Image (cartoon, helix red, strand yellow):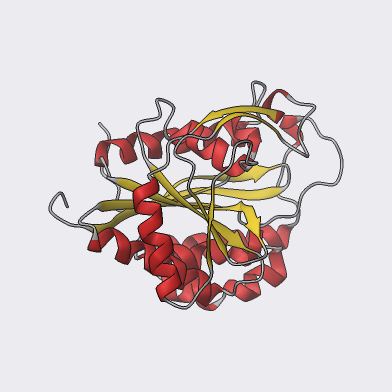
Amino acid sequence: MADRTGVVAGALLPGMPHLLAGHAAPSWSALADAARDVGARLRRLEPDVVLLLSTQWFTVLGHQFQCDPNPRGQHVDENWYAYDYGLLDYDLRFDVDFTERWAGRVQSDGLQARRTRYDGFPIDTGTIVTSALLDPERKLRWAQVSCNLYADADTLATVGRAGATAARDAGLRAAVVVVTGMSSGLIQQWIEPDQDRIGAPAHEQWNTRILDLLTAGKIDEALTVREEFARQAQADSQFRALAFAAGTGASTGPAHLHAYGPIWGTGGAVLSWNLPDHH
């Protein structure tokens, strides 16, 4: 693996801030611990860059690319601000040179790529939570594209493929991280952490079906039923993040399921592909 360039590994994680809660539900703690484990494996891999897509950084015009090398500050989550996990400090590192390459490749594929760089840009909760769990010492270098609300799955796959091509052309070893939930049926009332559960039995069934396909290495079948999953279980952003991951080539082979459970009624899973053991 050390001699390969392009995308060599991937991971899928939820980006809900509950994973950083001081008083956490058992499922929140398990998902957070699994994310930290994935982070340890990812750091052992020592990728040159990590391609990142978070469904919580959504845009409506084209595909935006983060070109600030070091966004930092404090984010107030618009939903969970009253909790200890609603105020999130961040200090991120982005590989702007590679990001420019990626954006250029997206443009050459006929899509609109917008570079984003200004002080105070609103970094999304999913990006902050994921970076805190995967990379607490800020050793990884990220390259991030937004999740366009109106892009279909094939378009997001094209954006992902462009990132993989840009990495290969630059002679870089890249990993891919997608930040997405599974079912998104939020419990519509305030609950205590130990009251958390998947919002509906049908959502649980669909989450299990998708996870079974991914852990069996049946990515094409999972993509085939993705739209039905979105309809039947309110899948986060229609689960288009999986199409992005597939476009990069990160989701090759059987996925390793590290943890699965509810986050305020939604379904959250931590999955990885082709990461080394960290022991």
Q: Percent x, y for residue 253? A: 32, 64
Residue displayed at 34% across by 65% down: 249
Q: Is residue 158 above or below residue 91?
A: below
Q: Percent x, y for residue 1? A: 17, 52
Quadrant where the C terminus sits is top left
Q: Is residue 89 above or below residue 129?
A: above
Asked where in the image residue 39 lies, by quadrant, the reply is top left
Residue displayed at 71% across by 71% down: 231
Q: Can residue 103 be seen here?
A: yes
Q: Percent x, y for residue 212? A: 48, 62
Residue nearer the viewer, 45 or 141 = 141
Q: Percent x, y for residue 55? A: 60, 55
Q: Left or right: 84 with respect to 2?
A: right
Asked where in the image residue 255 lies, by quadrant, the reply is bottom left
Q: Can residue 256 be seen here?
A: no
Residue displayed at 75% across by 54% down: 185
Residue nearer the viewer, 154 or 236 = 154
Q: Left or right: 51 with respect to 241?
A: left
Q: Left or right: 95 with respect to 157?
A: left
Number of dots carrying numbers: 0
In this view, which residue lies farthest toward the front?
A: 118
In this view, which residue lies farthest toward the right?
A: 189
Asked where in the image residue 17 lies, by quadrant, the reply is top right
In this view, which residue lies farthest toward the left?
A: 3
Q: Is residue 191 above or below residue 183?
A: above
